[in-house]
Image: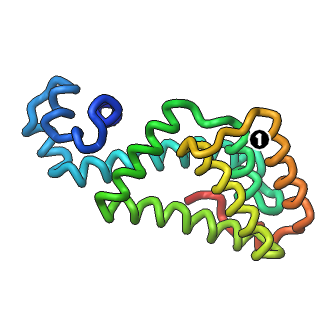
Amino acid sequence: MDAVESVARREGVSGLSIDAVAREVGISKSSVVYDCGSKAALLTAFTRHQLCQYRARFDEVLQAHAGRPNAWLRAMIDMGREAPTEDDVAITMLISASMGEHAECRELMRASLAEDARRVAADAEDQGKMLQLLLAVHGLLFLECFELQRFDETTRQELLDGLMKTLETDKGSSSTASVPLDK
């Protein structure tokens, strides 16, 4: 997966090929074909890998909020506290290009975002208000990850503090305790 990222950064998604990835890793093209099959499958595997890494980090943050109302949304807000790195931006751009070219990548992202919405709605007393907060968190992250808008550290924290303050007004669902924290 590191080779996919390296090649895509250097040559763009259009320059990403099974042959280029094989050269980057120092293995035969047939080895990559055996493991992945096609460029689309390679990009799908890369997208899945990145989502799994994100979810692993997210699950750690989520555990800090276990048992609290709206734990999923609290964790999402906390994940936004750190500005995206140059690596985060590069990966976002690669996955975005992959989604434009391959339905499988788009479906992986769609499923991930749908899970966020499902979990936030399940945790909330006021589902509409908490889904609005989810949209705001995603909007902040997407603006920064696509480098459409960069907020200075103080502004980002103030925005997220405001979202958290609004979240605190929601007592959470009475079924929150029954919603499992695992995927």
Instruction: Quickly name the residue at label 1.
Output: 156
The kind of residue tagged 1 is Arg
Q: Residue at x 80, y 39 (%)?
A: 155
Residue 160 percent across, percent down from the top left: 80, 48
Q: Residue at x 80, y 57 (%)?
A: 67
* Farthest-out residue, front: 148
Evaluate whether residue 174 shows in this view.
Answer: no
Q: Which quarter shows the C terminus?
A: bottom right
Residue 23 percent across, percent down from the top left: 16, 27
Residue 158 percent across, percent down from the top left: 85, 43
Relative to residue 154, is residue 3 drawn left or right? left
Q: Residue at x 68, y 44 (%)?
A: 79
Relative to residue 96, is residue 26 drawn left or right? left
Q: Residue at x 88, y 67 (%)?
A: 170
Relative vertical location of residue 14 with respect to residue 139 in this rendering, above or below = above
Picture quadrant of residue 168: bottom right
